[in-house]
Image (spheres, grey):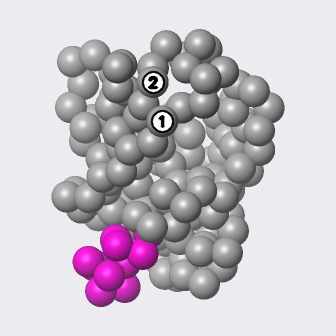
Amino acid sequence: MKIRKAVGAIIVNDKRKFLLQKRKDQLGFMYWDILRGGIERGEKPLDALKRELYEELGIKKIHTVRRLNLSFSFEFSDEMKKIIGFDRQKVEMFFVNLGKEKVKLNKKEIIDFKFFNKRQFLEVATFETARTVFRKAIKKLNL
């Protein structure tokens, strides 16, 4: 079984709102999710996170970043397995406080983004894995 290592982040701004990205996968499925991205060969998780923040959201300066010691994994659909060459993905989670840093959307990577309060985040996030890791993170961080 081929497992893709990835990073993910619970991202908060200076108004204590949490970021979700609207994305479309290679099969055309639209969804709202946390920032996630693969770790490239030889890359450390924190470096992968910083790269993903820049590539997807144009973020160069991070106010606060913290490894959460939380992770989750999921299995890709059979169609996605054929496209990307991996069976599963294991996501190591971080907490990112952007402070007042502004997001600059990369339309090649994501369709849209929005900041939500905790209740809205849990209502809008498409995947249960994102909702579960969000609940664990905000409890761990006392947010």
Which residue bears the numbered disc 2? 87
Left or right relative to 124: residue 49: left
Residue carrying label 1: 75
Q: Where is residue 99 in the image (x, y as percent from the top left)?
A: 42, 70
| C-alpha distance separating marks 1 and 2 | 6 Å
Q: Is residue 60 on the magenta stretch? A: no
Residue 76 found in image quarter:
top right
- What residue type is disc 2 on? Asp
- Up/down of 122 relative to 119, above or below: above
Residue 21 shows in this picture? yes
> For the residue marked with disc 1, what is the amino acid?
Glu
Residue 21 place in picture, x, y as percent:
63, 53
On screen, residue 134 above or below 82: below
Mark 2 element type: loop
In the image, 13 versus 43, the foreground residue is 43
Tell me, yes or no, if residue 51 can be seen here.
Answer: no
Disc 1 crowd, CA 10 A, few/some/many (<14, 14-19, 20+): few
Q: At 59% across and 13% down in the image, what residue appears?
A: 82
Callout 1 touching callout 2 (CB < 8 Å): yes
Q: The magenta stretch spans which residues? A: 134-143
Q: Position of residue 104 (x, y in %)?
A: 62, 48
Residue 80 relative to residue 34: left or right: right
Q: First in sequence, mark 1 or 2: give its number.
A: 1
Under circle 1, the secondary element is strand
Compared across the picture, whether 46 is left or right of 12 comes to left
- Residue drawn at (34%, 71%) of the image: 137
Mark identifier at residue 33: none
If the image is split into quadrants, where does the C terminus sit?
A: bottom left
Provide the major secondary structure of the magenta segment: helix
* Labels in figure, total: 2
Tell which of 123 and 50 is nearer to you.
Answer: 123
The quarter of the picture where residue 25 lies is top right
